[in-house]
Amino acid sequence: MKHPKRHTVTAALIYANGPIHIGHLAGCYLPADIYVRYLRSKGEDVVFVSGTDEHGVPITLKARNENTTPKAVVDHYYGMIKKSFEEFGISFDIYSRTSNQTHHKTSSEFFTNLYEKGVFEEQESEQYFDEKTGQFLADRYIVGTCPNCGNENAYGDQCERCGTSLSPTELINPHSALSGEKPVMKATKNWYLPLDKLQPKIEKYISGHSEWKPNVFGQCNSWLKQGLHPRAMTRDLDWGVKVPLKDAEGKVLYVWFDAPIGYITATQELLGDDWEKYWKADDTKLVHFIGKDNIVFHCLIFPAMMMEHGGYTLADNVPANEFMNLEGQKISTSRNWAVWLHEYLEEFKDQQDALRYTLCANAPETKDSDFTWQDFQARNNNELVAIFGNFVNRAVVLTHKYFDGKVPAKAKIEPIDQQVLDELSRFPGRISDSIEAFRFREAQGYLIDLARLGNKYLADTEPWKLIKTDEARVGTILNIATQISGSLSILCEPFLPFTSKRLEGVLNYASEGWNKAGVADLLKEGHQLNKAALLFEKIEDETVNKQIEKLKAPEENMEEEDNVTPQKETINFDDFLKMDMRTGTILEAEVVPKSNKLLKFKVDTGIDRRTVLSGIAKHYSPEEMVGKQVTILVNLAPRKIMGIESQGMILMAEDSDGSIRLLQPDEVTDNGSAIN
């Protein structure tokens, strides 16, 4: 398209059922932020929207496992996710949520528009039903073996190992995620989007975007080649946007019908009546940043919905990334094999850009990539500290030493000077071209190359040797060095926004935008620099080793450590009466160092406040345990586990699939209430 008048940029709506980890960041949020910051620096009109998807089945599963409500789950994680993004510098114009009433209203109106146009096909079909729980099973409530790769934990809509989109009936040996029982087929009515009939329109749209990344364009064409099928846009559930029809009691909109509409409602919340030009104008460029598991929804289903509704701008590009692994293994939230953003922000104070830099340098743009702590350390120390930071520090320190911190005048321009100035002028265009082609790794590579150019220039000209014989020549060299530093402060902002601010402080310069980068007189003669300050902090071996140990700490076997007998003897009623079980409330919770299994709690038992250890770290985070009322065996003899004395046992139940649930009273009771 010709140069757009405005840009609408979206980043995937993440399920509000857990914290953010580095896989999420590398997949779509960091590249989206780099792109948006670049557009803003260019002076473009852009809105950047995202939010939490709060209606998915993973939300209800999380609530069920935690014996709480879906609303309590989404409220907790929305706040956690939003705060983490803000502290990491992801610069959304709005971070909304699909539980907002604005979203419910807009989604209902969107559905009604298609319904009244006769787009949907009403079908009665046989769907899986859990007789034990008495409810129909949404796709994610059904688990079985993937027919494509053999993964035994594939969901009814998608296998997360191989990425294949599935229907529940394709699973081998399906079972209910609610009860573990084999489901039966039962008739139910739903409304379907006839993707088979809409395929010609979708094909025309996709064929017009052969410039898309090969993984995106190829996956879309693979789906189209197989032939699209009607897909239900309603579900038999009680959590979500209610279907706005009289005969749709007990049904909600399919999460992948209402979730993308969340981008629209977020824009409405942000801009009010001005929202339409960012979604319905021909001169607006719409870009969706997503992970590869969401390609089908953003490239086929959502465009089909918008085409049938009419009046909407379709996405100009959908630059989906592949997956990021961790230390050679797939990130697994259930195994706690992840680097959680909120924990990183707590443990690496003011080092957001070190992680941003490493994730961008290893971004899974064309294939799955890998994050390792040693690579993180090496990139920070060998590139950010030794190249970028070192150059700026030398330029500023020498300018203060020889010219009282004032940018000196240029004298005669030597060939080496002109060569460097010519190279400097080319860097903004190189980085721009790479960003606009969604090649962020390449763009950031050019950025560090500019710092390398500055280092080489100082090494080749050696101003510290010339100062005694040719002060004017040194002035020229340091003038050019400060110009490179000024351009770095502008060009690094999309990638390293915290560094950019620090560098602007050192240079005493406020950025005037991307178009000022690369010029030979960005910082004027006589401009006063502030004192040099380190832009980056070196990361020591001890710090990295601690993270590796934390990640790979062996699980502790509490039973073996305490020499518990393998089987309990039969007891009589009098023995049972000796057990003192009470209700208590968890006041504090934390992870036990070097254990992937143990959490340490401070519990108010009503009779005292005591320390209790529990092996549930894989199932519950410390944050979500605080405030929960639990049942506790208070007269169990104390025992030491990993050097910490545990003074009781919190009672729980283990499902057949290995998931753990707290045994909690139906209603809040007084702490210390006896359980008989």
Image (cartoon, rainbow, N blue to C red):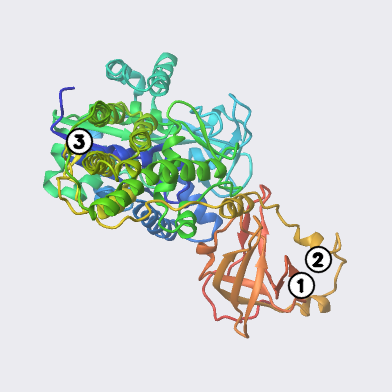
Mark 2–mark 3 Cα distance, whole angstroms, equals 61 Å
Q: Amino acid at mark 3?
A: His
| Residue 226 visible in this rendered orientation of the protein | yes
Residue underneath mark 2: 562
Return the residue nearer the eye: 169 or 600: 600
Residue drawn at (56%, 68%), measured in percent from left and top? 589
Classify residue 264 as left or right of residue 87.
left
Mark 3–mark 1 Cα distance, whole angstroms, equals 61 Å
Residue drawn at (35%, 42%), measured in percent from left and top? 465
Give the quarter of the figure containing the N terminus.
top left
Q: Secondary structure at mark 1?
A: strand
Return the residue nearer the eye: 239 or 425: 425
Residue 469 location (% of width, % of height): 28, 42
Residue 59 location (% of width, % of height): 46, 50
Q: Amino acid at mark 1?
A: Arg
Marks 3 and 1, the one that precedes in the sequence: 3
Residue 348 location (% of width, % of height): 47, 56
Picture disc at residue 639: 1
Residue drawn at (12%, 44%), measured in percent from left and top? 274
Residue 367 location (% of width, % of height): 48, 27
Give the quarter of the figure containing the C terminus.
bottom right
Residue underneath mark 3: 7
Q: Secondary structure at mark 2?
A: loop
Marks 2 and 3, the one that precedes in the sequence: 3
Tags 2 and 1 touching, CB below 8 Å? yes
Q: How many marks?
A: 3
Residue 419 occupies quadrant: top left
Residue 648 occupies quadrant: bottom right
